[in-house]
Amino acid sequence: MFRSTKQEWFSNIKGDTLAGIVVALALIPEAIAFSIIAGVDPKVGLYASFCIAVIIAFTGGRPGMISAATGAMALLMVTLVREHGLEYLLAATLLTGVLQIVAGYLKLAELMRFVSRSVVTGFVNALAILIFMAQLPELTGVTWHVYAMTVAGLAIIYLFPYLPRVGKSIPSPLVCIVVLTAVYLLSGMEIRTVGDMGELPDTLPVFLWPDVPLTLDTLWIILPYSVMLAVVGLLESMMTATIVDDLTDTPSDKNRECKGQGIANIGSGLLGGMAGCAMIGQSVINVKSGGRGRLSTLVAGVLLLILVVFLSDWVSLIPMAALVAVMIMVSIGTFSWASIRDLKKYPPSTNVVMLATVAVTVGTHNLAIGVFVGVLLAAMFFANKVGNILYIGSEEADAGSHRIYRVVGQVFFASSERFGSAFDFKETVEKVTIDLSRAHFWDITAVQALDRVVIKFRREGTEVELIGLNEASATIVDRHAIHDDPAAVDKLMGGH
């Protein structure tokens, strides 16, 4: 345990600290922007980002991943805040945390096994596009100074790493922020700064219990929002964990991450913050800046609070163009450019799943809906593909009296109709043997298809023998088949 703690916390002190500084600076305008989206005071998002980042550093299952207030979660809060106010949002945040902890103990993170790589790629590409689109308001209707500063920031980010010695030791996004802030202060140009985004808090967060009635009516008000927040939060966190796993080539405990997210959201709600989850953009910034361990997440959260409470006068002077440059870098780095090249190489079904995930996510600005559509399409394509892998051949054992059918493949809801149409019920034979030794029956639909085949042959006066059922198939057939039950047979075939 000591070795794993040392590895997760102190194996990369310099890299984690510097990366945490970059993330903290980038979190400030995003937390303010997400608060505005949700319709609450900027300090709600800033307190949430601090609480969630600090708590998840200790409780999360993915070292190096950044969690805070997010846009996807903020979008789900708008109606609740507008109709019922901030106190109900805090109550919903607490319930969200409880639901996520329950999901962790139920091991619902295992459901990520059913999310295909094409869905993950679509999710990543959609998020990259959304991150870029979120920067457009800062680049619309502005003076040429903003464009010049943004281009200069991107140049620093991409060229600074090539400098000898210092290029690899200091994160280029941090250099970008410091240099552009210095240029802004020295030039006196009129461009938007972090201070223009909203008023920064000047006090530490304090414990508070949501001032709502503890009644069933309150529960019914917040429950739908809490369920949506819990699902979207876990979905985005699990997808982000998968991406960071790939970037760092290290595994993560996703069920622990579910519980950690829940604990973090409870802490956020009790300190006046809104619900949050993992942030792919900030997580990528962290990894690209050298962050690998839990220390980077802790530094980001603690430094965020120090900056906004004690150094707000300085932080408010950071030009938004510098942070826009950092986020454009994140967008470019997040997008899977190989997926465009692979469109020619991959099957059409894979491409459709990826592109549909991108289109729906970008169109709705809802990651949960986009991923749901992608998973649904992937499941349909898979079922269709497996359903077509079914072969049924036949041969005469005794001329005119006995025919043997051999079934090879998977029989389930998508292939049951094909299974039923492969037999010749009009052929005059005394006996039919159906060899199922190379087939597998998966569901009730498959069993009903087998029932219909046996019953139709018997109605033609043909004796039917089933052989070769494997143990799993025999279990479901013995339990649910009704071809030996006369009353059930009549009902199945449309009798009264």
Image (cartoon, rainbow, N blue to C red):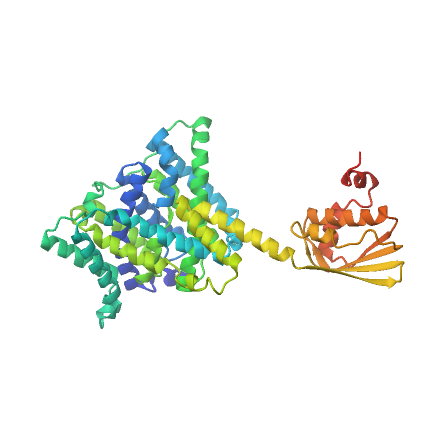
Q: Furthest-front residue in view?
A: 426
Quick one: 481 or 459, which is closer to the camera? 459
Q: Which image quarter holds the N terminus?
A: bottom left
Q: Residue at x 33, y 56 (%)?
A: 331
Q: Furthest-bottom residue in view?
A: 164
Quick one: 325 or 35, which is closer to the camera? 325
Q: Which image quarter holds the C terminus?
A: top right
Q: Is residue 372 visible?
A: yes
Point out residue 444 in the picture as x, y percentages from the top left corner: 69, 46
Q: Residue at x 22, y 72 (%)?
A: 165
Q: Residue at x 45, y 61 (%)?
A: 251
Give the number of marks: 0
Residue 170 picture quarter: bottom left
Q: Is residue 293 left or right of residue 29?
A: right
Q: Is residue 61 visible?
A: no
Q: Is residue 61 left or right of residue 41?
A: right
Point out residue 84 in the picture as x, y percentages from the top left corner: 36, 29
Q: Residue at x 46, y 27 (%)?
A: 216
386 is higher (above) or lower (below) than 310:
below
Q: Is residue 61 left or right of residue 188?
A: right
Point out residue 221 in the picture as x, y percentages from the top left corner: 43, 30
Residue 203 picture quarter: top left
Point out residue 148 in the picture as x, y percentages from the top left corner: 18, 57
Q: Is residue 351 left or right of residue 155?
A: right
